[in-house]
Image (cartoon, helix red, strand yellow):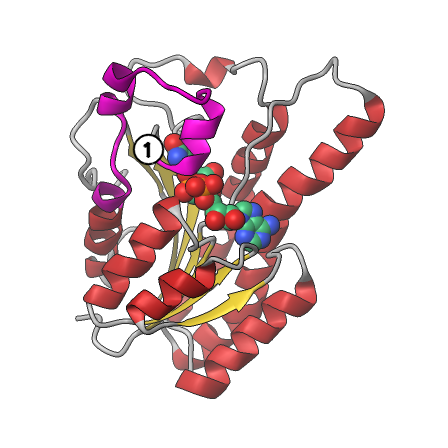
């Protein structure tokens, strides 16, 4: 099904992005990887993939990744906006720190998605098909019975940036539906990656770590979502939760 499909995956040097890249390459996609870390080169060479080093919030970088992809492979079928960052932030932070944190978090989590979306949309419209998947969080789509909507108290910018993804995803889903382009948010919960490990302190309790999802499990759900094809759900927030079966939920009515 994916044989020869061209997929751009951002933030693919480690964690969820690396698992998505590995799985899509295994499924026969031509994968193009980006990350701000040089070690993206190692992931890419293992997969025989193309790679680019740069910041997703940099319009020149984004344009050059998309232009190079079209020039090398002719098109872009799948875009996975996975790159993201978290920092501890809150309303009583120092003014200058807050300004810096805002630019960094919104740059990685929103501007990058916005830029890649804008750069690939005309290509997908022209070919009358496409898949855009934005990686969000279960803070936006909490597990049934959980009260995470009530906030955390120390991640206002992260949460605001991920809620802002809804604006792009829902609007793009509407605007692009006539061109058989689907746009969905994968709202993942606690997943065992460098991000969550460093957020949880240097030595997280192994019992807790055991409850976290594995990046490879979220990659399986990504594949299931892509397999729905152009008649599948669009404009959906798809929740995956630690401690629950990591499976593609039914589409929302
Ligand atoms: N791990 C979790 O528990 C969890 C939970 C909810 C959502 N998420 C989301 O999943 C996505 C992947 O997270 P992860 O856990 O694999 O994190 P990670 O930190 O392990 O990997 C993220 C990758 O994105 C890259 N990146 C970040 N900002 C970038 C930028 N501006 N330009 C280019 N590359 C950039 C990093 O260099 C890194 O390689 C993120 O969007 C994150 O918010 C993760």
Q: Which residues are magenta?
A: 191-218
Can see residue 137? no
Up-down: is 156 above or below 228?
above
Up-down: is 232 above or below 66?
above
The C terminus sits in image quarter: top left
Q: Residue at x 39, y 29 (%)?
A: 138
Coordinates of residue 156 in the picture (x, y in percent): 61, 23
Q: Quadrant of residue 27?
A: bottom left
Up-down: is 196 above or below 224?
above
Task: Report crowding for label 1: few under 14, some 14 to 19, many 20 or more residues within 10 A (C-alpha).
Answer: many
Can see residue 65? yes
Indicate yes or no whether the magenta region holds residue 91.
no
Q: Quadrant of residue 20?
A: bottom left
Coordinates of residue 152 in the picture (x, y in percent): 52, 15
Q: Is mark 1 within 8 Å of ligand 1?
A: yes
Q: Quadrant of residue 206?
A: top left
Q: Residue at x 46, y 69 (%)?
A: 51
Coordinates of residue 149 in the picture (x, y in percent): 46, 18
């Amino acid at each position: 099904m994916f044989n020869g499909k061209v997929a751009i995956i951002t933030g693919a040097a480690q964690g969820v992005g690396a698992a998505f890249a590995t799985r899509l390459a295994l499924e026969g996609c031509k994968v193009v990887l980006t990350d701000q870390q040089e070690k993206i080169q190692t992931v890419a060479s293992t997969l025989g993939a193309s790679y680019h080093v740069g910041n997703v919030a940099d319009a020149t970088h984004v344009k050059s990744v998309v232009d190079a992809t079209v020039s090398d492979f002719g098109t872009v079928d799948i875009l996975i906006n996975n790159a993201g960052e978290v920092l501890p932030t809150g309303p009583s932070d120092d003014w200058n720190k807050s300004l810096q944190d805002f630019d960094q978090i919104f740059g990685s989590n929103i501007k990058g998605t916005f830029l890649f979306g804008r750069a690939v949309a005309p290509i997908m419209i022209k070919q009358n098909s496409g898949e855009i998947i934005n990686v969000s969080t279960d803070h936006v789509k909490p597990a049934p019975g959980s009260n995470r909507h009530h906030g955390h108290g120390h991640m206002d910018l992260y949460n605001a940036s991920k809620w802002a993804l809804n604006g792009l995803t829902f609007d793009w889903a509407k605007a692009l539906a006539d061109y058989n382009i689907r746009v969905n948010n994968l709202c993942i919960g606690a997943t065992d990656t460098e991000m969550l490990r460093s957020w949880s302190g240097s030595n997280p309790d192994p019992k807790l770590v055991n409850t976290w999802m594995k990046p490879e499990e979220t990659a399986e759900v990504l594949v299931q979502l892509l397999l729905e094809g152009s008649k599948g759900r669009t404009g959906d927030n798809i929740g995956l939760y630690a401690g629950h079966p990591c499976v593609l939920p039914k589409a929302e009515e």
